[in-house]
Image (spheres, rainbow, N blue to C red):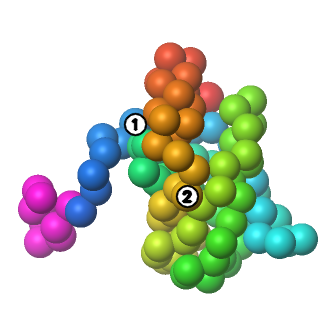
Amino acid sequence: MNETDGHVNQRQHERKDTRFTARVLIGAHSVTGRVVNISVGGAKIEVDGPIPRDSEITLSIEHFGDYAARVVWAHQQAVGIKFTEPPDVMADVVGAMALYGPA
């Protein structure tokens, strides 16, 4: 674990910065957002509305598809999510996003 500014980094996978448009789907409700960074294990999403911690969601990333996840933290206009999709699926997505670069 890396420690920076007093916070312990508990991430298992390297994050890639991005700016792809997304929608966070919570049942019949949806919130517009933007993927700030993404890894095989999870992502940080800036959102236009509140999303409660521990919510089961679908992250719909423009041009890339829909992915199941759980909100592990929520702070003001941002949420951290952990993907519940298989790691090999998310590795393909992260690789494609890195190839096409920030939107």
Q: Residues within 10 Å of mark 2 (few under 14, many from 20)?
A: some
SS at badge 2? loop
Q: Quadrant of the N terminus?
A: bottom left
Q: Which of 30 and 13 is in front in this view?
A: 13
Prevalent SS, magenta region: strand
- Judge whether residue 22 can be spotted in this image: no
**Given this view, does label 2 or label 1 mark the residue nearer the observer?**
2
Q: Position of residue 74 (x, y in %)?
A: 51, 76
The amino acid pointed to by label 1 is Lys
Looking at this view, name the residue that lies furthest to the top: 99
Up-down: is 13 above or below 57? above
Residue 20 visible somewhere in the drawing = yes
Residue at image mark 1: 16
Assess disc 1: are there few (<14), some (14-19) or many (≥20) residues with their C-alpha within 10 Å of its C-alpha. Answer: some
Residue at the spot 16% in from the left edge and 67% down from the top edge: 8
Stretch of the chain drawn in magenta:
1-9
Residue 78 lies, with reference to residue 60, above or below; the image says below
Q: The residue under label 2 is which amino acid type?
A: Thr
First in sequence: mark 2 vs mark 1: 1
Kindly identify which residue carries mark 2.
84
In this picture, residue 36 sits left or right of residue 65 = left
Report x, y in % for residue 10.
24, 62
